[in-house]
Amino acid sequence: MTRLVSRQPSYERRATRNEKMPRLRTKAGKERLLRRVRKQRLKSVTILPSLITILNGVFGFAAIIFAGEGEFVKAGYMVLLAMLADMLDGRLARMSQNTSSFGGQLDSLCDMVSFGVAPVFLMYQVLGTRLESSGFTGESFSQRFIWLASAAYMCCAAIRLARFNVENEEDESAHMSFVGLPSPAAAGVIVSLVIFNQEALPELAEKNTQFYTFCDSAIIYTLPALALGAAVLMVSRMRYPHIVNQYIKGKKPLSHLIRILLLLAFVYICKLPTAMVLAFCGFAASGFVKWLYSKVARKKGAVPHQDEAGQELLNEDLEPEE
């Protein structure tokens, strides 16, 4: 017995198939692409820049260990060594033209340890020790504020590094300035003050006790607030110059060489801890000062312009990016 089956005309089947295929192709293509991305394996890496990047993370880890053991000065210098490693790894990768997404992600992970966790853990240990020696026990308001400032700094450092990964360009010519305070500079504000408090100030105790007491109290009480300020500057859209690319690399005017020599002479006269405090705090404040000046200049109708190097523009350089 033959079963009669009503068949759809061929042209109607083709029309129905053509209506459904674009959607199926798009969905299936997306799924295949996602599977291909998930199964993608890293085949090769650049050895020397990656080793220096990992060394950055090792220095940050050592800083945390030293801070936990009460060796605050050693912990501060470990963070400074991490800054040096962080500066070298990116420079070597760009010079050898071997920049990669793997290197960028590894650099940010190590930066999070060295410049996001280690500085505020060092600050927390220093201030916690000072509070215990002053007789503060239990959960006081000061301890809660210090904890809050440390947590806020760590979160803003993570946001700053994640945003940098998304917006970063591998081209060396694009690295003339930073959007927001770089995390190494923010860490330098905290670490330089801790080193100055622990290493340079005790030398003043024998010469001038009152001045030592004033400086010591000022640093201890303002350090959490400075950490909060550095955290806000990291996630801001204020522009900060890339010191090496703008003032050192390549051919520059003779005035740049004179400024660098004067800076080295200033470091020799003031000694390293004092010079670091002035350098890091001055650099962190410079972005805010330029932003504030641009606001005042706009109200007066006189806004200076900037050349292609990105050094003097205030109306574009400090304007928040969309």
Image (tube, helix red, strand yellow):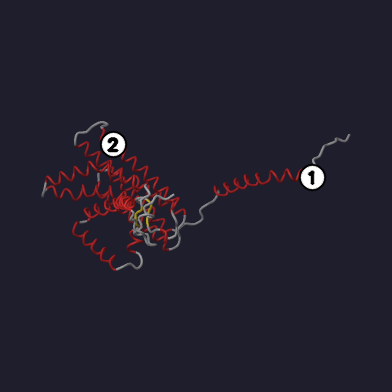
Find residue 65 and report its horizontal and vertical position in percent. Answer: 30, 45
Q: Residue 99 lies in what quarter of the image? A: bottom left
| Disc 1 residue crowd, few under 14, some 14–19, many 20+, Cα 10 Å | few
Task: Assign a secondary structure to mark 1.
Answer: helix
Residue 248 x %, y %: 33, 63
Visible residue check, residue 78: no
Q: Is residue 206 left or right of residue 19?
A: left
Dot 1 or dot 2, earlier in sequence: 1
Amino acid residing under circle 1: Ser
Nearer-the-camera pick, 215 or 292? 292
**Callout 2 amino acid:** Phe
The image quarter containing residue 19 is top right
How many C-alpha atoms fall within 10 Å of the one at disc 2: few (<14), some, or many (≥20)?
A: few
Q: Nearer the viewer, residue 231 or 84?
A: 231
Which sits in the foreground, 181 or 39?
181
Give the residue pinned by disc 1: 10
Name which residue lies at 35% across and 48% down: 234
- Tell whether 283 sits left or right of 176: left
What SS does tag 2 mark? helix
Disc 2: which residue: 145
